[in-house]
Amino acid sequence: MATHAQTLSRDKVAAALPALDAMARKAVDSGGVPGLAIVVVHDDAVVYLKGFGRRDAAKPEPVDADTVFQIASLSKPVSATVVAALVGERVVRWESRIADLDPAFRLHDAYPTAQLTVRDLFAHRSGLPGTAGDDLEGIGYDRAAVLRRLRLVPPLSSFRAGYSYSNAGLTEGAVAAARPTGKPWEVVAEEKLFAPLGMTSTSARHADFVARANRAELHIRLDGAWAARIKRNPDVQAPAGGVSASARDLAQWMRLVLAGGQHDGKRLIAADALAVAHAPLTARGTNPVTGGASFYGMGWNVEFGRHGLAWGHAGAFSVGGRSVVTFYPKANLAILVLANAFPTGVPEGLSDSFADLAFDGKLEKDWMKPWDDAYAGLFGPAVAAAKAAYGTPPKPPTPAMALAAYTGRYANAFVGDAVVADSNGVLTVSVGPGGAHTYVLKHFDRDLFLCFASPELPDLPSAVRFAIGPDGKASAVTIEALDDWGMGTLKRAE
């Protein structure tokens, strides 16, 4: 087992490529994913670039090197590279305080608000609880509203004392870093990274992705088969998860990173501004599949594993997308795998298998299965808990009150308004700006109803509980789907 890989010959890398090709083809042919695109970069050369399978499982168009994928959280290291460009130009510093860059932004408490830096937000150590803000995005709020309402969420840990992966937090770090330019983040990303590298199919705007003729659709499993059913517009948190790109484009970014900010002999980003993002700031324990010691830098996972130091990041849209990139900087090697499906561990399975073959000439184990199992089990505890709680209604259930006791408008500062209505004898709850999302409620027991709020898990029940006041009418409602961080209880407003 290689533990401290320093150099790697081109012959060893080349020898591993046929097996990578065969494994990728098998993954598609066996139904592991509908489509894949893979890049391998070694010693500043793109040594492998290929697509497999279909953009849409129900259509014949193939995935190729120019197919544009939504890369989800692989956007984070791309965005960290954009900020590094700004740091290198002295537009901003990693240590710049958000209070100076974006004075309107607030965390829950005054001291963290005053001291918070770009570094803190890219390292996920602000204290913001993980998915806070994702819930608001999911019901239709725009970026400004999501970021403004983060001040209402109590911290999960003390400032800089814990790691909590936050899409909304990293988004604020990127948006704030771009503010001195006077330009939107999406423009800054294009000007500082995409355009200089010739990444003409890459964008941080969803509208640009939708306009690409050669694009991969998102797929989930329905009745055992991959189906492209759900769209995902990640513009609200574009720096954290909204980049779309082709494998060909991302190969140029991979070359830039491996070359420490140089590209085709020209320095585009200051080496020290880029390198500091790979410093291991926060311990994350061990990789659950490989066992490597895992840390987080700024927009980067940093791992010390069986092939030495690795930088990387994975991405996932639970509504149908997967991606992973892994850099072995001491060997000048990087591999990226994009897939148009969820859940699947195929990207990591291919990446880890290729690394074994390149460094050791043989597979340590079948990496595909444990990674598939890891992703397949992501929702397992939540599904099991929901089914245990709500899978079987009481017999007999206590009847609900007259529906008029529940109807009306409820509100809190975080979620905003929730309007409960009687729709031909069935209760509904509408949430989000202008009632953008409506949940149909199914009675379970007395003042407890169920809705099915998850697009990727349409059969997963989620509770909507009413608290009854002394006047016999509901005085509050708790929407479990919006209550991850205790922000889902809304009081009657009328």
Image (cartoon, grey):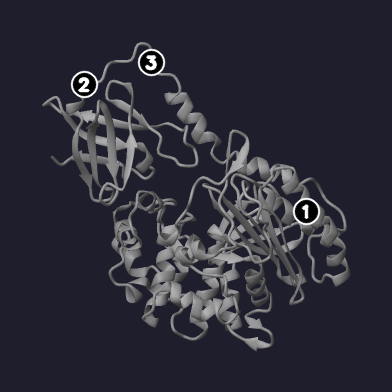
Q: Going by the picture, which residue comes out furthest to the front?
A: 60
Residue 394: image tag: 3
Q: Secondary structure at mark 1?
A: helix
Q: Position of residue 180 (x, y in %)?
A: 38, 81
In the image, residue 111 sits, relative to residue 291, either above or below, namely below
The residue under the point 58% across, 84% down is: 270
Q: CA distance from mark 3 to mark 2?
A: 17 Å
Q: Amino acid at mark 3?
A: Pro
Label 3 near label 1: C-beta < 8 Å? no
Instruction: Quarter of the image for the C terminus: give it.
Output: top left
* Residue receiving disc 1: 353
Q: Of the two numbered discs 1 and 3 on the same chain, state the one appearing first in sequence.
A: 1
Image mark count: 3
Q: Is residue 283 visible?
A: yes
Q: Given this view, does label 1 or label 2 mark the residue nearer the observer? A: 2
Asked if one can make out residue 126 in the rendered structure from this viewpoint, the answer is: no
Left or right: 470 as drawn, with respect to 326: left
What distance separates the C-alpha of mark 1 from that of mark 3? 49 Å
| Position of 377 relative to 167 (above/below) | above
> Mark 2 is on which residue type?
Met
- Towards the viewer: 106 or 285: 106
Q: Quick one: quadrant of the N terminus?
A: bottom right
Q: Nearer the viewer, mark 3 or mark 2?
A: 2
